[in-house]
Image: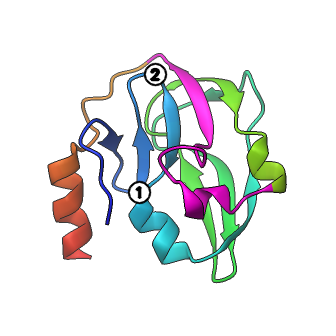
Amino acid sequence: MNIPEILKYTRDHEWLDDKGTVGITDYAQESLGDVVFVELPAIGQTLKAGESFGVVESVKSVSDLYSPADGTVVAVNEALSTTPELINQDPYGQGWIIRIEITGQTEELLDSQAYQQQVEGE
């Protein structure tokens, strides 16, 4: 399982980088199975930490996506509209979901070590 040290993580399996890019973790995409659809928010939408901003649908289930921080959506990964499997293929790269302008604190997020401990306990 790939858990990059440079990212921060939510307990709900989203990741956030220092530029405001958000995606789901390798663990999450593996648990979901083949992703077939992603519902993306509108650019300009204001998000609160922990608030649902979209949905990822796989052959096994449908899961809400939760914002890791307060912010405003400044970009969405349009490629996911036609190629949602990018989330499975490259969850920390081409499979990113949104970019936000962070307006709130991120201290509540987990570092890679804490996230790995959580995943190992599931």
Reading the image, the residue beneath label 2 is 19
Reply yes or no: does residue 95 show up in magenta. Answer: yes
Q: Quadrant of the N terminus?
A: bottom left
Which residue is pictured at 64% across the width and 75% down the height? Answer: 34
Question: Helix, strand, or loop for circle 1?
Answer: loop
Reading the image, the residue beneath label 1 is 13
Judged left or right of residue 76, residue 71 is left
Span highlighted in magenta in the image: 83-103
Judged left or right of residue 31, residue 112 is left
Position above or below: 70 against 88 = above
Going by the numbered disc 1, the residue's amino acid type is His
Label 2, label 1: how many angstroms apart (C-alpha)? 18 Å
Going by the numbered disc 2, the residue's amino acid type is Lys
Which residue is pictured at 44% across the width and 39% down the height? Answer: 68
Of 96 and 111, the residue lying toward us: 96
Question: Helix, strand, or loop for circle 2?
Answer: loop
Of 117 and 69, the residue lying toward us: 117
- N-terminal of the pair, mark 2 or mark 1, is 1
Q: Position of residue 111 (x, y in %)?
A: 21, 42
